Each structure stands twice: as C-alpha cells, then as structure tokens.
Image: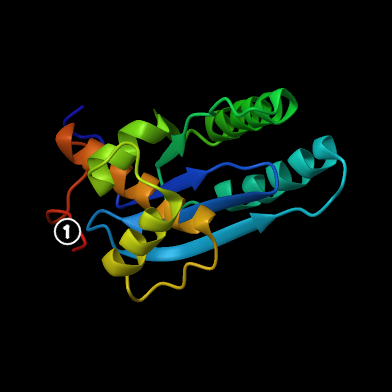
Amino acid sequence: MMNEKKPEYIIGVDLGTRKTGIVLIDSNSDIKTLWLLESNLKNEENRINEIATQIKIILQKPVFDYACVELPIYIQNFRTSLSLGGLYGVFRWLCGERHIKVIAVSNRTWKKEVCGFGDIKKEEILNYSKQRWPECDFKSQDLADAACIAEYGVQFLKEKNLINGSDTKKAG
C-alpha cells in the first residue's frame, strides 16, 4: 500500500435522469473541468441510455482514479427512483470496467460535511458553490452539487491518507 500511486484528480458525480453533473477536481480542490450531460428524449429508458453513453465517454479519460458519486435517493415518483438506481448501477459497472474506485455518499452526508448542513436547500448549495469556486460557471444545480460531491471525495481521501494536497478551503 505504501507504493500505491496517490491520485491527483477525482470526479464528483450528481446522477440524474435528465441531467447529470460531473466535475473534475484536483487534490487541492481546484475545479479543472465541468461536464453537464443532458438528455431531452421523452422515453426515460432512452434518456438513461443516452446519459450512460455520455458517462462512458468521460470515464475513458485516463486522468482520475476515484469517482465520488451521490447515492440514489427515493423520490415520490417510484419509476424515476428506479431509473436513478439503474443509472447508479450502470455508473458503478462502468467504473469497475475502468478500475476507477468509487466513493458512494448520501446526499445528507456530503451536504453536512461540505456545506455545513445536511438539509441545506438547492439555492444555498448553488450560492455556496459560486462563492467557493467563483471562477466556475455553474450553469446548472447539477454542476454545483457535483462540485460539492467532488469536494467531499477529496476530504474523504485526505482523511484516509490516499491523496495529497493542501487543506481544502471553505466558502464564506
């Protein structure tokens, strides 16, 4: 384990059935790239397939060893909850194919650890992200969430001594 390569980059992933945000962040918590994957197809199964194909393309980039992804949540629409779970499974499988280690985190955990409150509202997360990374254009809530999920991943890896980098800075 001592000779194991310490990752320099990690992706944060906020999965969605219409939009998925993916953010590439370095071990100093500086954002390098933002990807907003979208599908406007009417059929949910086709949307999931389209987003999964886009995810596969991003995962082929050989710059990161870890992905931090939000666990699927139950929403009032059972069908959408099922689709999110399916997309999460596909994401885990694609990461396994590429030997990318996955850190799965609940939405309440990353919100509390990164933003300070487990029940923080979407607008507050967007404001936090804009303050934390003013150089980034968060065109979507999904990107702001993905950035915070990536930040959680960096903190998690530092606690486990699996990543180097300066202490993460918080907004505000």
On the question of residue 4 being in view, the answer is yes
- In the image, taking residue 136 as reference, residue 49 lies left or right, namely right
Q: Position of residue 78 (x, y in %)?
A: 70, 23
Residue to which mark 1 is pinned: 169
Task: Tell me the residue at 43%/40% (across/down).
Answer: 67
- Choose between 46 and 54: the one closer to the eye: 46
Q: Relative to the observer, which residue lies in front, 44 or 68?
A: 44
- Amino acid type at circle 1 is Lys
Looking at the picture, how far across and down is residue 102, in whole percent? Answer: 43, 32
Residue at coordinates 16% horizontally, 59% vertically from top-left?
169
At mark 1, the secondary structure is loop
* Image location (x, y in percent) of residue 43: 87, 41
Please name whichever residue, 141 or 64, is drawn nearer the observer in this view of the structure.
Answer: 141
16 left or right, relative to 9: right
Give the residue displayed 74% in from the left and 26% down from the top.
79
Farthest residue toward the bottom? 135
